[in-house]
Amino acid sequence: MSLRPFRRYFELLARYLRPQWLTTLLMSLLLLASIALQLINPKILGYFIDTTIKQGLSQGLIWAALLFLAISLLNQALSVASAYLCEKVAWTATNALRGDLLAHVLTLDQGFHKSHTQGELLERIDGDVNDLSNFFSKFVVHMLFHILLLVSMLVVLTTIDWILSVSMGLYCLLVVVALTWMRRPTVDRWVIARQASSEFFGFLGESLDAAEDVRGNGGINYIWRHFYQRFYRWYSTTCHAGWSGATPWIISQALFTLGKVIGLVLAAYLWSIGIASPGTVYLIFVYSALLMEPLDQIQWQLQSLYQSESCIRRIDGLFKTSSAIQDGPGTTALAPGALAVAFEDVSFGYTNDEPVLQQVSFKLEAGRVLGIVGRSGGGKTTLSRLLFRMYDPQSGRVCVNNVSLTELRMRDLRRRMSLITQDIQLFQASVRDNLTFFDRSISDQRILEVLADVGLQSWYQTLPEQLDTMLGAGNYGLSAGEAQLLAFARVFLTQPDLVMLDEASSRLDPVTEQYIEKAVDTLFQRRTGIVIAHRLATLQRADDILVIENGRILEAGPRIELAANPNSHFAHLLQHESGRIPV
């Protein structure tokens, strides 16, 4: 094994254990006390045996027996306390590591999230770190504990006979070297097993998310077939990695048994030449057997080390993944008020060989409303993703108030804009938190005013716990139309300077849609608006129209002029839709 995994591990260890140095110190002291007690108790039994042979039963033996019981109970108490502290330190450290991983993943660009399923990322953030948690709690502390215990026992054996100590020490060294050498190939196997686990949970999360579509379209057999294929790969790779340690384990048990036999033979030899008493013989045998216990634990921790190294590799890989979207310097501040938007010769594709937008250029003045129409797949939604800087164009630039998006901090940019799509994300949280995105600075009175404005007051009155009612997977989830109304309420609460609606009214029934028209008019007052729509009736409030097809702008201009021109593309679209937009 190279030194780099050890170095990286101890870097993680130092970073996440430093805030808990006091608890770690107490845990170490308890372990040291436990080592001392484990070394003392066999000596008491050796004294008991020798005294019994020489003097028979006496009051001193009773006190020795009571001392032995007291030390045993104290040792158990110390073991429980140290185990509790050990787990507390480990979970506190790894929870902080989980938080850092999640924060890092949330900063990565949309392209990364499109290429990794939610289940896969969940397994990497939680599953890998969970295995590393076992490593935190057992390897470092237990390995040091058992190494100290091993060295202490060899020192005690030296006080009996130095040849005995050297012989057992060399044998222990031989066992550790042999087991370490035999376990070398297991690291790559655990990496493969962890990757198979991520793929399985990624597929599982994706399948559960699409459960309604799968059942409705008869795709259950496909899901089951691929479920078993991925599960079998995960199972087989994990078994292969686990069984790779079976041979070392079998050999280690034989070596441990041989070590006990060697200790017993040496003790019997010392007794036969008159150097050791029966109590000393017992003491040597007990210490020889105890020597094998640290070795047994050390070899299991080495197995954990190789498995944890695979987790460290994957965690390292995730931390080293950088976002394709780099935050701007933020040296230029946007002026308050409605925002002007400009696309300057923008070309973009999600892959380099498949362009979605080609040399797109247009300007939207501050305070005006732009309607974008065109066939599905023409690039309308891609425009919104570039404007909110979820992606950067391959060429050209997108500007807000004549400032390139790459010059702005993304947090400052997105604070000034809001996007409403037809797919609304609800959190497993209260109505208040779903509306405010967990911003507690927004008053309840303001929330109630907005709910009334968007037409959700009657729905709100049915909630048993009002703003504290839980949404999401509970009994008080919203319908598709109500969820979109809630999304409008979110925008009213954030008060952005630019609002983009991407098919935002597609799931509203006609009555609800008419009700919200007034709210949308209010929303667009003194703000810049962009409306992406298939239904042209939703563009009545648009000042300008942009017709896009196959990634290119076919037509752009004032809505009234384009609608009045029978030769315009927009007029042709109006003719194919029942009911014309009033001009």
Image (tube, rainbow, N blue to C red):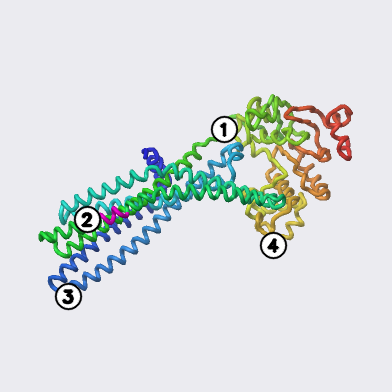
Q: Amino acid at mark 2?
A: Ile
- Nearest the eye: 263 or 521: 263
Residue 72 visible within the image = yes
- Left or right relative to 113: residue 358: right
Q: Are marks 2 and 3 in contact (CB under 8 Å)?
A: no
Region rendered in magenta:
253-258
The percent coordinates of residue 32 (x first, y second) are 29, 55
Secondary structure at numbered mark 1: loop
Q: Main secondary structure of the magenta part?
A: helix
Tell me the SS state at disc 4.
Answer: loop
Classify mark 3: helix, strand or loop. loop
- In this rendering, is residue 105 above or below 284? above
Q: Mark 4 against mark 2, which lies toward the viewer?
A: 2
Give the CA separation, mark 4 to mark 2: 74 Å
Asked whether the residues under the numbered discs 1 and 3 touch, taking CB atoms below 8 Å apart as contact, a structural biologist would say no
| Location of residue 470 in the rendering, given as x and y in whole percent from the top left corner | 65, 57
Q: Which residue is mark 4?
A: 464
- Which element carries disc 2, helix, strand or loop? helix
Residue at 25% x, 54% y is: 259
Q: Please, what is the three-letter code of the amino acid marked with disc 4? A: Pro
Q: Which residue is mark 1?
A: 326
On-image quarter of the C terminus: top right
Q: Residue at x 58, y 46 (%)?
A: 202
Where residue 2 sits in the image (x, y, percent)? Answer: 37, 38
User: What is the three-letter code of the residue carrying label 3?
Assistant: Leu
